[in-house]
Amino acid sequence: NRKLVLSCPMNLQRRAFEQQLLLAAELQRPVSIHVVRAWGDLLDSFDTVRELMKQKYLLEENEGVTDTLSKRRKKPKRLLLPPKIYFHAFSGKAGVVPSLLAACDKGNVPREDVFFGFAPVVPNYFSPKTPSIMKQIGIHQLVLETDLEDASNAWDDLKRGVEGLATALDMDVCDVAEQTYQNAERLYFGHRS
């Protein structure tokens, strides 16, 4: 059992991450999150930001920031986390997925606005467990990605990604390419298909 040695202490990483997450929630900007062996810390950070956003909304209501007319209307659930959340180079176990989705639900983030990417260059992409995790997530929440440092090989890596998803999901390569394209449009540009 190797102990993870961090160049920056986890408490400082969490504080910086929570500030960035809070800013994204306040400004209604999407986030891309990469986690390595820190899922509990991520979920704790989501809890912290949700509570801070609840406090912010209560303060606004108490200070009369919202106008009288909007108080009378039925209020939609306010976002307590950023509006779109993308788990880049996902490397979590199958049991992590329901916890992440539940945390996003608590933050009032619609399921269709939570995305996962698997990068063929990351070793866990070829793990025997990865296809079942891809199936668990489902094609409508998956996006293609590459985590290569050299962009000249990105196209080949994306093709490997499409082929890997197609195999895992028992789908046609063209269908996977089309759906992941639509998912990326939704993630990055807000287009609904």
Image: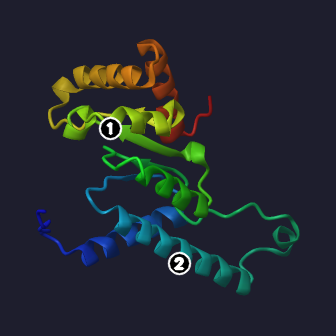
Quadrant in the picture for residue 157: top left
Q: Is residue 144 above or below residue 99?
A: above
Q: Is residue 83 above or below residue 132?
A: below
The residue shown at (48%, 38%) is 136
Quarter of the figure that contains the N terminus? bottom left
Q: Residue 185 in the image: x percent, y percent?
A: 51, 33
Quadrant in the picture for residue 169: top left
Element class at badge 1: loop
Q: Is residue 91 above or below residue 16?
A: above
Count of numbered labels shown in the rendering = 2
Amino acid type, callout 1: Lys
Q: Residue 63 in the image: x percent, y percent?
A: 70, 86
| Direction from residue 6 to residue 189 in the image, left or right | right
The residue shown at (86%, 65%) is 73
**What residue would you read off at disc 2?**
52
Which residue occupies the foreground of this view, 120 or 2? 2
Q: Residue 57 in the image: x percent, y percent?
A: 65, 76
